[in-house]
Image (spheres, helix red, strand yellow):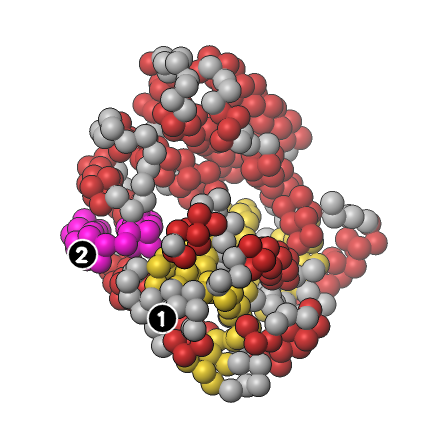
Amino acid sequence: MFNRTTPYILFFFAILLQACQSENPKKDTWFVGKIDNPRWDYVIIKHKRFVLDTVPLDENNFFHYKFSSPVKEGMYTFIHDDTHPFYIAQGDSLLLLANTLDFEASIYYTNDHAEENNLLMGLNHRLKNDNFYWAELSEFTPEEFEEKLIEREKENQKLLDNFREQHPNATKLFLRIARGIIEQDTYLNKERYIYAHRVNELNSDPIPDEFFAYRKKINFKKDTMEVYYPYYRFLRTYLDNKVLDSFNNRVTYDRSDYELNKYRLNLINEIVEDKSIKNHLLYTSTRTFLLYTKDSTAEKDFLKLHNKLSTCNIGQEYLEGLSSYTLQIKPGNKIPKTKLLNYDNTEVNLQDIINKPSVLFFWSNKDIQHQKTIHTRIKELHFKYPEYQFIGINTDNHFKKWRNEIDKLGYDYESEFQFYDSDLSIKELVLTTRNKVLILDKDGIIRNGHANIYQRTIENELLQYLN
């Protein structure tokens, strides 16, 4: 937990006041922060889904961001390893303190609209960390789960009621956002329960009709909720359930199933009226299918359907670019000729270093925790499956820092490489998650282009490909 001492707060205010001096301070809007133990050397500021700026951390891990245009009061996000919402209005000077060793629990705001932001972070932390595990969902009858959700919502509403009493001047906009967060949490967990109930074949208690009554309130208007994590997660889970309702023989949602996902796109087009949210749901559903499908023909047809239904040219262009790379790493294709640097700073070709069944994994100096955990996992797998060579590829651009890290931590320098052109190579290998690995045969032919190093099935895959 972050230690919020008075001297530290006062020092932080002094830094802010010095940074935010201007001729018209009332007209300027500032977001300033200090992130201890940073994982990146920058933060990204976004409004809705649009990036406003990438702001570097200074030598003391401070960032200072002055909004360049008038601020529309409401929800924004900053990204540092993960996405975190914040509330701000024109003329605010909002201060953030955080420590990545316990990021969400440590986030603390001071100055303008600090109380609102601390309430939002409190709700965010509670809802994320007090959530129901999947296995736990099937332990309740529908009636028992309904009672649990009512109790949970009352506790969260009490926090909001207390805030309202202490801050009678809170804006209607903020109160609507906070109430929406609480409601969306209830909706999300109901949809999760419906999905878990479907998967759990031993559960003989049918879900009563009244359990679904909340669905009548769904209007698919993103309003102010789009920056908060349960919102689109709720919509995605709702769509999963609605699609499976139409495929009675399907129990779980297969992201690579063409018919299932085609039906999903048409369902989105049918029930969602708001263009912005429709385009976003079409985009995310299509992107997921492109990443998961192993069928090149299905991928091309699916992309055509997306472009027919979507009115967002930017989304269409991005997905067409993504597809040009995902088509290259389908099973049966040879791994691209991605350029790498070896420990001796010599350029090598990825295809040329494959001489036995291989697993490619990826890491960055910017995320030390992930760097250590993924190497630990690789060490375990290497011990169990010595038939494979495990090739680590660093995704950063600083060669000396990477080689120093290899020396400091004692990694096998013969099995470690760095991208020659990080931006291009990340696109070529479609690195969309940090836990992604590619599994190749001895000739560099792709067996799985989108495996997860921590997925339970990966060891079965490794054995299967050997046989």
Name the residue rendered at 50%, 81% in the picture: 341
Residue farthest to the right, as pictured: 7
Q: Nearer the viewer, residue 245 or 333?
A: 333
* Label 2 – label 1 distance at C-alpha: 24 Å
Q: Nearer the viewer, residue 415 or 290?
A: 415
Q: Examine the structure image and report whether residue 45 is included in the region drawn in magenta.
A: no
Percent from the top left, x then y, of residue 146?
48, 17
Q: Is residue 100 left or right of residue 465?
A: right
Looking at the rendered structure, the secondary structure element under dot 2 is helix
Q: Nearer the viewer, residue 49 or 415?
A: 415
Residue receiving disc 2 = 297
Which span of residues is magenta-colored?
284-311
Q: Is residue 174 left or right of residue 315?
A: right
Name the residue rendered at 40%, 35% in the picture: 234
Name the residue rendered at 48%, 75% in the picture: 419
Splitting the image into 4 quarters, where does residue 348 fall? bottom left
Q: Give the amino acid at mark 1.
A: Asp
Residue 180's disc number: none
The answer to which of marks 2 and 1 sits earlier in the sequence is 2
Q: Give the amino acid at mark 2.
A: Thr
Looking at the rendered structure, the secondary structure element under dot 1 is loop
Residue receiving disc 1 = 443
Name the residue rendered at 42%, 39% in the picture: 233
